[in-house]
Image: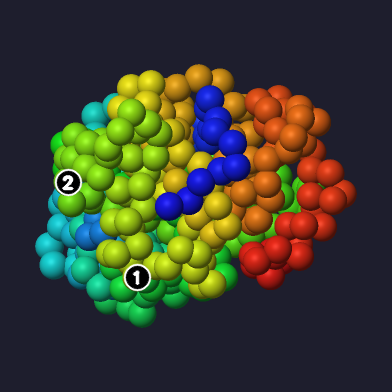
Amino acid sequence: MPQSNARRAGSLLAVAGTAVLAATTVVAAQGASAAAAGCQVTYTVSSQWQGGFGANVAVTNLGDPLTGWTVRWSFGAGQSVTQAWNATVTQSGAAVTAVNVSYNGSLATGGSTSFGFNGSWTGGNPVPAAFTLNGVACTGGVTPSSPAPSSPGPSSPAPSSPAPSPSGSAATRTVRVFWLKPTDVAYDQRYPDGIAAVMREAQSYYRQELGRTFTLNNVVVEVVNGEHDRNWYITTNCTGGDHYWCVVGNMHQELMRRFGISNPDSRWLCVGLISAEETNQSGGGASPGWVVLSGHDADGAAGVNGPMNRWYGGMVHELGHAFGLPDSTSTDGTPMSASFYSYPDTHFSPAQKNAILAGPYGGFLS
């Protein structure tokens, strides 16, 4: 299983913000008799997992003030809304209707509101191609009076990357990221969003340091519904007094088996986090091609386990191992030493930069 050259007291991530995984922005005209009308709608897939996804819809009123709004769109690949917030959302076939709730119906000129939902998908999850607001289809600008109401019919979906599946359909030569959720762990949006945001932070850091960086997939975090409960991952294949690698080792083996990934794999550099941990025992680390991290790291990614910089620096550190770097032999100011706790005030040495670019995954950087 993957191992660092030295253990860490702490690792990985923490975040604030939402990762944008797939988004489209359209301008729609709004129905309002004899009034200026126009709006912008931005649809964002904030996370996606096997058979499900979360999305956010932001609406900006570009026309005259509104006292109520209705947003409509049609899914292009059989998706279904399962839960919604900040709007009353109904669906008939592919057609979806979202209506304001009592506290967000008024939109001044230039005012914005948003609502979100969870949904299900099979086969693909493309972003909807068109929206209407108050019964008027997209027009691309503000109009002085409302045109005849219309609804968009089914249309070709916007291009999207293949949805993740156990056969391993993510784009190659990318950093592929997994959050494994044991059967007794409730889904929590903070985890995929947080992990994605920290991966983007690390992506920016590598570009700053190297002048090039790695590519993330459109769906940054693939949420994997684990096959077992937390206790199974903690106790299975775990003998002797040293339990440091037990949890992440079980996760690692499951991800490789279910997604057809090798150790290492020339197609992807992989990062796996699991929401399971034996208190004061479980850890994690990395070796070329893989980063594997346990529960406190996943919590850090979700923003519930300590200062942000610790987790940002930890991810930069572990990715360094995954790109082929060893630990530093002293606290030398580089992220391959304990200096990663000082992130962002830590920098790769010239020798480390050259080693990453010449290493087994240097060709992934662009």
Can the viewer see residue 163 in this picture?
Answer: no
Vertical placement of residue 253 versus 265, above or below: above
Image x and y of residue 38, in percent: 47, 54
Secondary-structure class at tag 1: loop
Q: Dot 2 lies on which element?
A: loop
How many numbered marks does the figure carry? 2
Q: Where is residue 61 in the image (x, y as percent from the top left)?
A: 46, 45
Kindly check if marks 1 and 2 are in contact, taking CB atoms under 8 A apart as contact.
Answer: no
Q: How packed is label 1: few (under 14 Cα within 10 Å), some, or many (20 or more)?
A: few
The single residue placed furthest to the bottom in the displayed view is: 156
Tell me: 249 left or right of 361.
Answer: left
Task: Give the residue displayed 54% in from the left and 59% down from the top.
Answer: 289
* Apparent side of residue 257 relative to residue 204 in the rendered image (left or right): left
Residue 349, image x, y percentages: 84, 44
Determine which residue is flagged by label 2. Answer: 228
- Res. 158 image quadrant: bottom left
Residue at x-position 19% and y-position 34%: 231
Q: Residue at x 46, y 39 (%)?
A: 284
Q: How crowded is mark 2: few (under 14 residues within 10 Å), some or many (20 or more)?
A: few
Which of the marked residues, 1 or 2, is nearer the chain's N terminus? 2
Quick one: quadrant of the C terminus? bottom right
Q: Label 1 vs label 2: CA separation?
A: 19 Å
The one of 332 and 273 positioned closer to us in this rendering: 332
Which kind of residue does numbered mark 2 sit on? Answer: His
Q: Quick one: 311 or 89, which is closer to the camera?
A: 311
- Left or right: 80 as drawn, with respect to 322: left
- Circle 1 residue: 260
Does the image show residue 359?
A: yes
Which mark, by number, is residue 178? none
